[in-house]
Image: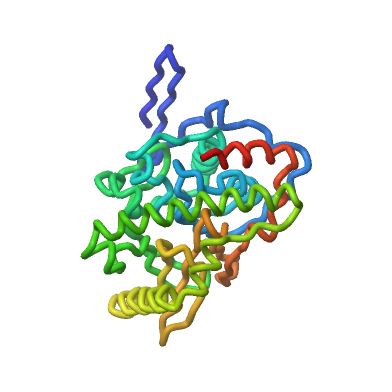
Amino acid sequence: MLVRDRQDDQLDLRLDDKGLDRRPVPAWLLGADPKGFRPKRRYRTVWISDVHLGTRGCNAVMLVDFLRSVECDTLYLVGDIVDGWRLRKGWYWPDAHNEVVRRVLKMAHCGTRVVLIAGNHDEVLRDYAGMSLGGIEIALEDIHCTADGRRLLITHGDSFDTVVLYARWLAFLGDMAYGILLRANVVINAVRRRLKLPYWSLAAHLKRKVKNAVAYVSSFEEALAHEAAERNLDGIVCGHIHCAEIRQIGDITYYNDGDWVESCTALVEETSGAMQIIHWAEECAIPADANELLIEECAI
């Protein structure tokens, strides 16, 4: 066991015989949850992706509510957690985005295995694959074994996107247009919240209505299912296209955990191995005093 203390910040680094970080949880990660929060839901595994911290479209307040409401053995962050593309153009990082980071770090320190699969918007993290940062494992992909014995490939999915692979300039152009759409989405939902109407995604609505978008999604799903079949796996979990889905493609089960800018969804595994998509926008109970934070994030 290695112990190192520094008087300036009382850092205590403890490694067990497996090389795992066993430091005490820092005080700033131990803040009590507000009164009135629902009892935590217990899952074996939780997958979330495409959070896009650093953008105005990120539903950070809703994600914090979700993270406070669940506990799990393993949390997979399946890419595009931080939007490096957008942050390079201009800095945007409100307190709600800090709270998302704090929640994830707290889960890691309290015993949850947290694995971050790098995506295309946080591709800088790919240089750190195989390392552990703050108790979070960084990886390019992973193989997950479910409670009922199935083996699933975990990957962000951008490596199967022909636009990202072969026309990167077009991907950046599309990202700019998508960013404008998401800003409109944030404003629309701020107004809807004031009117006590449920969350609704303009971007997701348009995606379902445009034939080319539907064909693109179907092609993407089939490409990933083919990859899982080539590796003799039972299924695949991804993100990237912001379309939560569970679909059987031949012998392969395709899972997409969705996103936190449009649908606010997560994929979860029960202790039995059964898996389902959670639509948090339909279940979330954000306190009324969070309204001001949501309106602040609408400033354009």
Compared with residue 252, is residue 43 higher up or lower down, i.e. above or below?
A: above
Residue 290: x %, y % from top left:
68, 39
Toward which corner of the image does residue 124 lie, by quadrant?
top left
Q: Residue at x 56, y 32 (%)?
A: 29
Q: Residue pushed farthest left?
A: 166
Left or right: 243, with 288 as reference point: left
The tally of labels here is 0
Residue 80: x %, y % from top left:
40, 52
Residue 100 seen anywhere in this rendered image of the structure: yes
Q: Residue at x 36, y 74 (%)?
A: 220
Nearer-the-camera pick, 131 or 147: 131
Q: How is the image coloured?
A: rainbow
Residue 285: x %, y % from top left:
72, 50
Compared with residue 50, is residue 242 higher up or lower down, i.e. above or below?
A: below
Left or right: 106, with 290 as reference point: left
Compared with residue 285, is residue 87 higher up or lower down, i.e. above or below?
A: above
Left or right: 173, with 195 as reference point: left
Q: Residue at x 41, y 45 (%)?
A: 82
